[in-house]
Image (spheres, grey):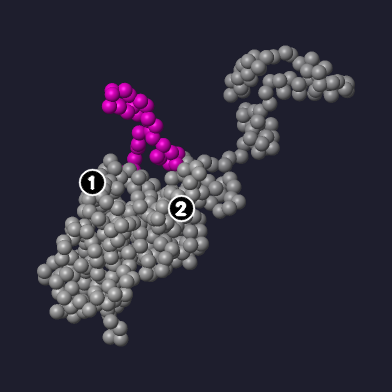
Amino acid sequence: MDAISPAILLLNLPPSALGGMDLLSFTTTSKFKGIKNIPSGLHFVFVGSTSTLSVRHGVWIKVNAPSSSSPPDFFIRKWDSSSEELIAETDVTTLLQQRANLGKIWRDNLTPYRQSASQDTAAVEDSNRWVQLTDCISESLLTRVLDADVETWTLTSSSSAKQDFDEIPGLSASDLTGNERELHLLPVDLRKTWRQGATGRERTEAAQDRSWALADLTTRFCNDDMNQIIGELQFCFAMVLTLNNYSCLEQWRRILDLILTCVSAVTTHPSFFVRALATVKLQLQHGQDVETGLFDLSDDGATFLKSLLLRFKKALDRLPGDAHADVIDELDDLLAYTQETLGWQIQQGSFARTGMLSLEDGEEVEMDNTAFDEDDEAGEYAPTVVELSAEQMELLGIESIQQVMNGNKTPNLRDRIQKDQTDAGRDGYQYEVQSDVESEKGLPAFDEDEEEELDLEDMDARY
């Protein structure tokens, strides 16, 4: 028997179940009892009752580096057929029995995590890829997201974050999740990316450049460690890859949307964006491994990511200086990969804003594309504050700066007639107190339609 190394026992698995660890997955047999020779680091073990689209259950484990002062890590999990979930084995008798039979189990029933490099180069490469895909995932991140200690880092395909719950009146979060674990993912709210109390221009800038929102998340939830943002991006991708978890897919999209819409942060934290782009490239290389089609990486299906990369590219091109040169190089590498390997066409240029779409029944409808509306207020098209002369203000019907501050509300025709009569009475020193009824009698009588028509004619005359 080879030397004892870190291992995990998976007991009571159903026949022909789906088993997997990290990037490796397989259909189990009756002889399969677990995996041995596990390298140190964080690993994810998952099981499904069938090899098809059943709910998958997984557990994160931490394997410590070999030490002469302590035995190798040995984990025991069992499949609970009644609840169809992977749980820790707590029965003392079973634990002692399995340890007593470890020699036979080790030789006949445990599959090596990987073969030697000469026997299976692909397995070694997969092991290295897993380390690269998860190098920013830490124990503290798993404890925060799973809200559990190291012994119960478990989740399933159905585990969800609060922001992804369906809002059903009368039902609480516990009613919606049942027995599923709630994921405590970062509260990325792309609808509000400005500080509390911000108004006007500050809100507009924070909506177009989400650097403040990124910094706020890092400070409040990540102890000022930006690697935790990338770590959660990696965690979500790994859970989509292994469990087909939809909530993690949505969070993966939200984090990418946040990162790739930052502008000023690129110059202050270039290393973060270089690492984030390298992570995205590595994830795209494994995106086609997702079995359910949650990742559609075709040229037509990847519209979300393509538009983000194009917008990020335009933002980098407008930034002055060369502090972000490494970010541009990494983005160019990513764009080259998407074009050469995935066949994406990401180009800066003209885009159709409106067009006719033919439906299956032959009907044609006019469609509008608003994806690039923000470009209308960027670069040479950015809004500019100008100072109006007295003549220009008169042409625009603006009487004072205060009127502009009040929304440029031009008096309607009735108000102007009343003002003219009031001014005429003031000029002739005729001051007469009238009741509201008498005052109304002095004005021409207009019904609502006539007044609206006169207002329109007056507006046409002025503009």
Q: Earlier in the sequence, mark 2 or mark 1?
A: 2
| Nearer to me, 312 or 73 | 73
Residue 174 badge:
2
The segment highlighted magenta reads 347-376
Labels 2, 1: front one: 2
Q: Measured along the vertical axis of the image, is residue 83 above or below residue 435?
A: below
* Nearer to the camera, 251 or 446: 251
Residue 230, magenta (yes or no): no
Q: Does 446 sit above or below residue 68?
A: above
The location of residue 156, given as percent across then percent down, is 34, 56
Q: Residue at x 44, y 58 (%)?
A: 184
Q: Name the kind of residue labelled 1 in the image.
A: Gly
In the shown orientation, is residue 191 left or right of residue 305?
right
Count of numbered badges drawn on the protein: 2
Residue positioned 44% across, 66% down in the render: 225
Q: Nearer the viewer, residue 229 or 346?
A: 229
Please indicate whether residue 67 sits to the left or right of residue 29 in the image: right
Q: How busy is the neighbourhood of tag 2: few (under 14 within 10 Å), some, or many (20 plus)? A: few
Q: Which residue is mark 1?
A: 343
Q: Nearer the viewer, residue 428 or 90?
A: 90
Q: Position of residue 254 (x, y in %)?
A: 41, 51
Q: Are marks 2 and 1 in contact (CB under 8 Å)?
A: no
Instruction: Specify whether residue 23 is in view.
Output: no
